[in-house]
Structure formats: structure tokens, C-alpha cells
Amino acid sequence: MAETMERLLPRDGDGGTKMTNNVVEAKNLSLTFQTNDGPVHALSEIDLTIEEGDFVSFIGPSGCGKTTLLRVIADLEQPTGGSITVNGVSPHQARLNRAYGYVFQAAALYPWRTIAKNVALPLEIMGLPASEQQQRISKNLDLVNLSGFEKKYPWQLSGGMQQRASIARALAVEPDLLLMDEPFGALDEIVRDHLNEQLLQLWAKTNKTVVFVTHSIPEAVFLSSKIVVLCPRPGRIYDVIESNLPRDRSLDIRETSEFLEIAHRVREGLKAGHAYDD
Amino acid sequence: MINTALASPRSTNPFAGLMSGTTGPVIVVVCAILAIWYISAVILNTPFQKEMYERANRGDVPVSQLVTDTLAQERPVLPAPHQVAQEIWKTTVEKKVTSKRSLVYHTGITLSSTLLGFLIGTTLGILLAVGIVHSRVLDKSMMPWVISSQTIPILAIAPMIIVVLNAVGISGLLPKAMISTYLSFFPVTVGMVKGLRSPEVIHMDLMHTYSATRWQTFWKLRLPYAVPYLFTSMKIGMAASLVGAIVGELPTGAVAGLGARLLAGSYYGQTVQIWSALLMAAFLAGALVALIGVMEKVVLKKMGMAQ
């Protein structure tokens, strides 16, 4: 009864009020693309719950639907079956409430805008006053260690810095949910390690819920509090692994037996799900 | 050791510095064009010159005399470069700008209708492109007309435009400008449609995640993305606009403008005058396109897109 009452309460524009602790709830979710070669089952019978404050990784080979699932959460794709809620409402409504920040595979910065102006882009669209924009720009660039680069253009920055700027842009919306689609996939391993550490610090500092798509086992294990192993044809969840690693971790943790144990379980899951076939 | 051995033959070559820039190659090309021009002038003007000698009963004229004479005819089939240069000098520097015999005066007339037509054409082109990109109906209904408009020979439609506009009392600059518009809106429309549609999927997705309106997506993404395309098509549009202005001057028996000079030149067999007007038109087109190039550089630099 109390829950029903809560559901009836009006939400504020920022999507700031929480109704449940479940940020994402998918039940029997499926998505089938109709192509010339017949239907492609990108997602099939997905049941998933993501709780507030979780760092959830989707891992699996190409074609397992991990990016598609993230895009469904972001209302960039429409599911063809089942149900999904984001912050207790439909993904469409959640998008209108600007409930999430989305980080793409590429930084997707606009080349004609400086770094500060790129971070300002969503704020301009939201129609925030200039002073508020300024304050959020400096705060979020500071969070990703890019203070001092406000006036630079994207091409003047390295790939890793560009991706950090795009994270600052996603954070500027001040969402409680951060959706990241292989954000470090195009970067070399040294930069990637460094950014992974920074991302964990960011997560600890901001206490956001993060959904992270990757095809790197060490990355998934290092970052996550929960690892979702997906398998292809049809795209489905094979295993969900709750990580017992401490939240406060450094790169050294990758040498520990606990880390290797989880990594092993992920690899076994991928193998059993025929991720390594052909 | 090896380095200096390799480098020395280069440094002894006096042309190395000249040819590495753009100046050297440009000079070479200009010299080649002038050489071909002179040779062609001699070949093409020789029959008439020989006829002249026969009439004057002069039997054996030395070749050097023949060459000199072919390059100094009053109405040659192909005037020599220096004759055209002299004519241009005479009709630009030595004539008052307001004189009807001044080439600057005629160029000014053509320039004004070129620019007016170009401005209207570019504006029209951008508006059409915005409509086509945002409305499926406009895309389906307008695009075929836009394309078929350019399949009609401009020489056929130019007199119609002039006559029709004259009939409704519009004469002077505007009818000629309309022909420039007719030619210049097309490249701008096509270029802008391409430009406005060129943002990558990831950039469009980003706008979608922000729940941006179409208007916001247009101003903040599509339009800036299309700017380089706009300048490229404006260069083509400008050249087309000048052609339109000159063609517009032909059927009306206009008394002023580069087209009028071409027409008058062909009436009286004044080939030197025709060629000087032609060259002037070419210079003008080059200057106008270069001007857009400079604008492009400045704008892109200001936008941070040029490095």
C-alpha cells in the first residue's frame, strides 16, 4: 500500500526523488530486429535488476546484445516484448526526465565547440541559466581532472582526455544513472587502466549507479560490483556474478586470488555460453 | 656523412627552392599556356595573313615576318596574349570608370547582378535544404523539381525569364539576377541537404539522449556540421552565378555588362574585345571564388574546425 502511494507521488523534473531502490528493472525483455535475412533475436528473455549505487558490467562477445540492452535502457532502442522500467518509469519517460547520462564508444565531442562548450551542450538544451552552467562545467571538468582545458578544442586533446571530457558532459546533466558503452574500447591499455582507476574514484565520490558495457574481462571484474555475462544467438543473460571485492580497490587487486577467481567464473560463463564458438 | 652526401645535390639545384612551393609550378603552367596560345595564334592566323600577302602581290615573305604579322592583326581569328593584355590595359587603366568603353564599368554591371543573384540563390538554396531535410513531403515533392530545373538549358530559359519579368514591369538588374539565382541555388541546395544530413549517428543519438527538440538539434548540431559543405557549394554557386549574369545579358541586347561586350564584339568581329571580356570574366570568377575561400578559412578558424 505504501508503495502504491509512493508511486502516485509526483516526481520532480530532475528525476531526483527515488521511488524504489531498483534503478533498472527488466522482466522477460526481448528485442527482435526484422532484417532482410529474417528476424534477429538481439535480446531474449532478459530478467535483470540494477539497484541504486550498483556498478554493473555487461560482458559478452560481439552480437550478444550488451550494447542493445544498454540502448534499450537509454530509450535509443524499443523492446519488442516484456517490460522494463528505469527509475520506476518507462525508459521514454526516464529520458524525458533526463535520468541518465550516456557515454558512447567514441567521445562524440562537437569539433566546433571548446571542451567547456561541449560540456555545456546538454545544459544549454536543458535551458539552465548561464551561472549554473558555468558552475556545473567547472565542477565536472574538475571531477575528470580536466580543469584548465576549458578553452581547448577537442582535436587538441588526446583520445583519453576526449573520452574524459565526454564523461564530464554526461555527468553535467547530474543524473543518478550513468550508462557507458565501451567507453575505453578505443584506447590503449595503459590509458585504459588509468581511466578505470579514475572511474572507480568517480563512482566512490558521486555514488552514482553505473551500467558499463565492455568486452574486457579484467576491466569488468576490476570495475564492477555486479557482472552480467551475456551470450549471443539469441542475446541472453547467462550468468550474474556478484563481486565480493572491496569497493575501494586499486589496480593491484588484479593480482589477488579473489580477483582471478571472479575472472575465471566470467570466462567459464562465456565459454559455456558458446561465446568462443567459431 | 651519408646525409650531407644525399642533401648536397639538392642544395646545388637552384630550382629546388622555387619548385617546392606553389610559385614555381604556377609559373610553369602559365608559361606553358602562353606558349600554346602563341603557337595556336600563329597557326590559326596564318591563312588570313597569306591571303593578305597574295592580295598585295608579295611573293616570298620571310617566316619571321609572317610570325610577327600574324600576332599583330586587327581582327585575328585568335588574338595573341599581348594584344588581349593591351586591350585590357587600354580599357581598364586608360579609360575612366564611368566611360561606356571602360571594361571596369561593364565588369561592375555584371558583378552587381552576379552578387545579387548569388545572395538570393544562396538564401533560397539554404531555405529549400532546411525544408527538404526536415519534411519528408518536401523531400519527395521538391527534390525532383530542383533537379529537373537544372536540366533545362539556361540559354533557352534565360530569354523567357527576361521577357516575362519585363511584361510585369520588372527590368534592369533583377531579371539578370534571377538567372544567376536560377543557376546558383542548385549547388547550395544539394550541398546543404548533404551537409545537414551528415552528422554521425552517434551525434544524433547524443541529442536524442538529451531529449533535444528538432529545433535544438538543427541549431546546435546540423547547421554547424553543414558549414564546410555550405562554403564548398557557395564556391560552385558563385561561378554559376557569374555565368548566369553573362548569359542574362546576351538575349536582351543589353548595352552594358561583360555579356554585352561579348555580344558587341561578335557583331563587329572584334575578337580582341571578346577575348579581353572573356579573360575579365575569368579573373572575376577566380577572385569571387577566392574571396569565398578566404571567408571559409576565417569562419572555420573561428569555429575551431580549421587547425
Image (cartoon, rainbow, N blue to C red):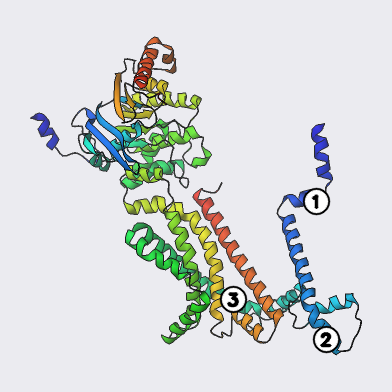
Task: Classify residue A52 as left or right of residue A223.
Answer: left
Residue A227's image quarter?
Answer: top left
> Nearer the N terminus, badge 1 or badge 3?
1
Q: Does residue B86 lie above or below A257 as drawn? A: below
Which residue extends farthest top? Answer: A257
User: In this rendering, which labeled residue sits more in front, label 1 or label 2?
Assistant: 2
Q: Tag 3: Cα neighbours inside 10 Å, few (<14), some, or many (≥20)?
A: some
Q: Quadrant of the C terminus of chain A?
A: top left
Q: Quadrant of the N terminus of chain A?
A: top left
- Between disc 2 and disc 3, the foreground one is 2
Label 2 element class: helix
Q: CA distance from mark 1 to mark 3?
A: 40 Å
Tell me the residue that label 1 is attached to.
Answer: B15
Q: Is residue B64 visible?
A: yes
**Label 2 crowding class (10 Å Cα cut-off): few <14, some 14-19, many 20+?**
few
| Residue at image coords 79%, 74% | B43
Q: Circle 3 is placed at which residue position?
A: B108
* Residue located at (76% from left, 63% from top): B32
Q: Which residue in the structure is indicated by mark 2?
A: B52
- Viewer-proximal residue among B233 and B295: B233
